Amino acid sequence: MDYITNFYVFLGSVMLISLSGVLMPGPLFAVTLKKAAKSKISGALIAVGHGIVEFPLMFLIFFLLSQFEVPSTVQVAVGLVGGLLMFFMGLQTFRNRNKHEDSAVSLKRDSVLAGVWTTAANAGFILWWLTIGTTLILNAKLLFGLVGFSVFAGVHWLCDFSWYTVVALLIFRSQRFWTERVHLAITLFCVAVFVCFGAYFFINALASL
């Protein structure tokens, strides 16, 4: 009975921590806003792209990195590279602000890729998993083993999937309000998010040198 109770408490904590992270506006939320104007399933596809990066990272931490402390040099390198990639993505978003995607296949492919690249370039995401995330994975491993970790990984990603799916659907349903001016404002918001997060990661990494 204690095992079952502890497991439910563990699941509840995973959901709360996962939702507290996904509900904070960031690069993935910004790109969801942009893609959702064209496709109601873009949020789900972006979450799939996010999972393509997130699941291997979680399993890598579980099987390899959970026994070692993350060197400060690795954290600095992640911050510098992630910051530069965020700047690049902001620049590309601004350059493509007038580009229209008409193909449904192109929209689906680009949404998945957007989830992959936005996640991979997010230094905050990588550092979170190498620090706080590693602690959560260790707890799951120590308390419930591989089964506990697998449940943890699935629940965490389902929180991401549910949030971005709902956000994209709501935005798509309200697209009658999306004038060209609104599209431009959303694009500029996305650019600002990428640039600000890029600067934040880059400056923090430099300060750690």
Image (spheres, rainbow, N blue to C red):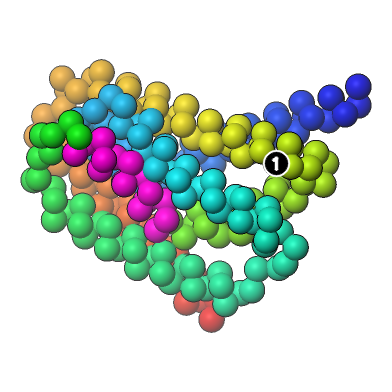
In this picture, residue 23 sits left or right of residue 13:
left
Q: Which residue is painted at 27% across and 47% down in the image?
A: 190
Residue at image location 91% in from the left, 26% down from the top: 2
Is residue 143 in the magenta section? no
Residue 192: horizontal and vertical position, in percent? 28, 53
Q: Is residue 165 above or below residue 62?
A: above
Asked if residue 190 can be seen in this view, the reply is yes
| Location of residue 172 by image quarter | top left
- Image location (x, y in percent) of residue 32: 32, 37
98 with respect to 107 (left or right): left
Residue 60, position in %: x, y?
61, 56
> In terms of secondary structure, what is the magenta stretch mainly?
helix
Give the residue type at disc 1: Phe
Q: Name the residue located 34 percent from the left edge and 63 percent from the top edge.
A: 85
In the image, residue 108 lies in the stretch drawn in magenta: yes
Q: Is residue 199 visible?
A: no
- Dot 1 corresponds to which residue? 149
Residue most extreme to the right: 2
Looking at the rendered image, the quarter that the N terminus falls into is: top right
Secondary structure at badge 1 equals: helix
Whether residue 104 sits left or right of residue 116 in the image: it is left
Which stretch is magenta?
Answer: 106-121
- Asked whether, in this view, residue 53 is left or right of residue 154, the answer is left
Q: In the rendered image, which quarter is residue 173 located in?
A: top left
Identified at 70% across, 29% down, the residue is 12
